[in-house]
Amino acid sequence: MKKNVIQIDSPIEMVGFIKSNGTACRFVSILTETIVTNIRKGCPYEGVIKISKKCGLVNVDYVESVKRKFAASLDEPVKNIDYTAGEIWYKHLTTIDGKSLPIVVNKKTPDNGEFYLQYFPTSAKSVYQMPNGEPVSEENLKPYFFKSNKVGYKPVVISVNVKNIKRLSASGVIMQTDDLPEALSALAAE
């Protein structure tokens, strides 16, 4: 399938594309560039940037996914599992008929202009660099990362700010920003 490449000037164009893809579960591939903020005090790499190429699924039913994984871990039928999701920081944008889209906003400040793509990662490759382009090894950063409290039967769900997405591929279309080459060259240097 030939992919259509669309150069975008604003993250809101990507939000519109993601919304137009609807509510079907599908694979997406994204390239992101994000300033690392969730890091311990005293980190000598202030302002470090994480550049990642990630693949994953959008529009996955989280509650059903948890139920399936939990049922498998107990060797029980899914119908015997009762699970209710806990408190979350976001709310999904929805279709006219109320179906959730993979775009979320902060439920306390939904009109602040920040949109996030929610996806379930299947693979990722990341590199780190300082704002001047100098590479930083993940090994050097590890002591400054917080430990994860992930529960084994709960799937990993990531919400990435759309303004940090440099390229998104879905449904035979590639949306990309004009500064994509810088992110690609950082990944290629790995």
Image (cartoon, rainbow, N blue to C red):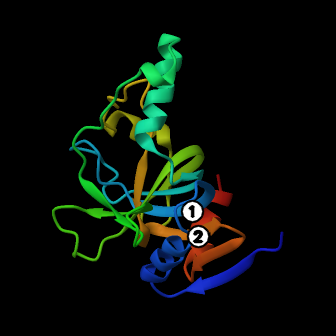
Dot 2 surroundings within 10 Å: few (below 14), some, or many (20 or more)? many
Q: x, y (%) of residue 129?
A: 48, 57
Please state if 106 lies on the left or on the right of 80 as rendered.
left
Q: Is residue 20 above or below residue 94?
A: below
Please state if 3 lies on the left or on the right of 41 as rendered.
right
Looking at the picture, tell me which residue is in the foreground, 136 or 28: 28
Quadrant into which the N terminus falls: bottom right
Residue shown at 33% from the left, 60% from the top: 47
Residue shown at 46% from the left, 36% from the top: 64
Q: Is residue 155 visible?
A: no
CB atoms of marks 2 and 1 within 8 Å: yes
Q: Is residue 179 above or below residue 31?
A: below
- Measured Cα–Cα span from mark 2 to mark 1: 5 Å
Q: x, y (%) of residue 75?
A: 53, 11
Q: x, y (%) of residue 157?
A: 43, 45
In the structure shown, which secondary structural element does the residue marked by tag 1 occupy?
Answer: strand
Residue shown at 64% from the left, 66% from the top: 170
Q: Which mark is residue 106?
A: none
Which residue bears the numbered disc 1? 31
Q: Quadrant of residue 188?
A: bottom right
Q: Is residue 115 above or below residue 16?
A: above
In the structure shown, which secondary structural element does the residue marked by tag 2 occupy?
Answer: strand
Q: x, y (%) of residue 80?
A: 43, 19
Which residue bears the numbered disc 2? 167
Looking at the picture, tell me which residue is in the foreground, 185 or 69: 69
